[in-house]
Image (cartoon, rainbow, N blue to C red):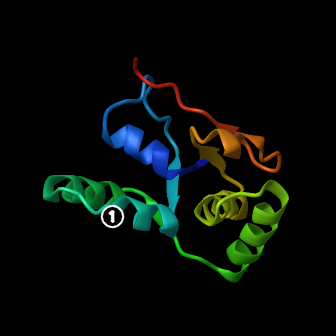
C-alpha cells in the first residue's frame, strides 16, 4: 500500500496525536510538505532534528511535469490552495491513498482519502 501524508498528518504523527498507529505501508510526502514542515519561523532545533529524521524514513516526491499539470487541474476543479493542489496531485500521480484532516481535500473524488482519528 502507498500512502501520501499531508502536512497536517505529519504534524499530528510527530506530536503523538494520532489515536491509531499508521498502517504498514510505503510512505511518501510531497516536496511541498517538506518545505512547509521546515519553514515555520519559530521552529526549534529539536523539532527540526525530529522532522529531518522523519523525512529520512519517507520518500519525498519532487515536482514533475505530470504533477504540475495535475495540480493545475485539481486547483481549477476544486478551488484548492496551491500547496494543497500539489499534495493532491502528488498522491494522484502515485495512485496512492492520501492521509489528511483537511476538510476541503475530502471532496476530491479522484483519490482515496482517509481522515485521521486524533487523541482527545
Q: Give the residue number, with chain letter if any, for mark 1.
A: 38
| Drawn side of residue 45 relative to residue 116, left or right | left
Picture quadrant where residue 40 is located: bottom left
**How many residues crowd around disc 1 within 10 Å: few (fewer than 14), some, or many (20 or more)?**
some
Near-viewer residue (7 or 78): 78
Looking at the image, can residue 1 be seen?
no
Query: Which quadrant is the C terminus positioned in?
Result: top left
Picture quadrant where residue 115 is located: top right
Residue 45 spot, x, y in % from top left:
15, 59
| Drawn side of residue 16 relative to residue 8, left or right | left
Residue 119 spot, x, y in % from top left:
40, 21
What residue sits 51% from the left and 25% below the top?
A: 117
Number of numbered discs visible in the structure rendering: 1
What residue sits 23% from the left and 53% below the top?
A: 50
Looking at the image, can residue 10 be seen?
yes
**Furthest residue toward left:** 45
What residue sits 57% from the left and 42% below the top?
A: 100
- Image vertical order of residue 39 relative to residue 46, above or below: below
| Drawn side of residue 26 relative to residue 77, left or right | left
- Image vertical order of residue 44 relative to residue 17, above or below: below
Residue 9 spot, x, y in % from top left:
48, 43
What residue sits 40% from the left and 38% below the top?
A: 12
**Furthest residue toward top:** 120
| Drawn side of residue 104 relative to residue 18, left or right | right
Disc 1, SS = helix
Query: Which quadrant is the N terminus positioned in?
Result: top right
Residue 60 spot, x, y in % from top left:
47, 66
Amino acid at each position: 500500500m502507498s500512502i501520501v501524508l499531508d502536512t497536517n498528518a505529519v504534524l499530528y504523527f510527530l506530536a503523538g496525536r494520532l489515536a491509531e498507529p499508521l498502517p504498514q505501508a510505503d510512505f511518501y510526502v510531497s516536496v511541498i510538505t517538506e518545505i512547509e514542515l521546515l519553514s515555520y519561523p519559530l521552529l526549534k532545533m529539536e523539532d527540526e532534528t525530529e522532522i529531518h529524521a522523519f523525512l529520512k524514513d519517507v520518500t519525498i516526491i519532487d515536482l514533475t511535469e505530470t504533477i504540475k499539470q495535475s495540480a493545475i487541474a485539481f486547483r481549477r476543479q476544486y478551488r484548492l490552495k496551491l500547496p494543497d493542489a500539489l499534495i493532491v496531485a502528488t498522491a494522484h500521480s502515485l495512485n496512492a491513498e492520501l492521509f489528511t484532516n483537511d476538510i476541503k481535500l475530502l471532496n476530491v473524488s479522484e483519490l482515496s482519502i482517509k481522515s485521521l482519528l486524533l487523541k482527545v
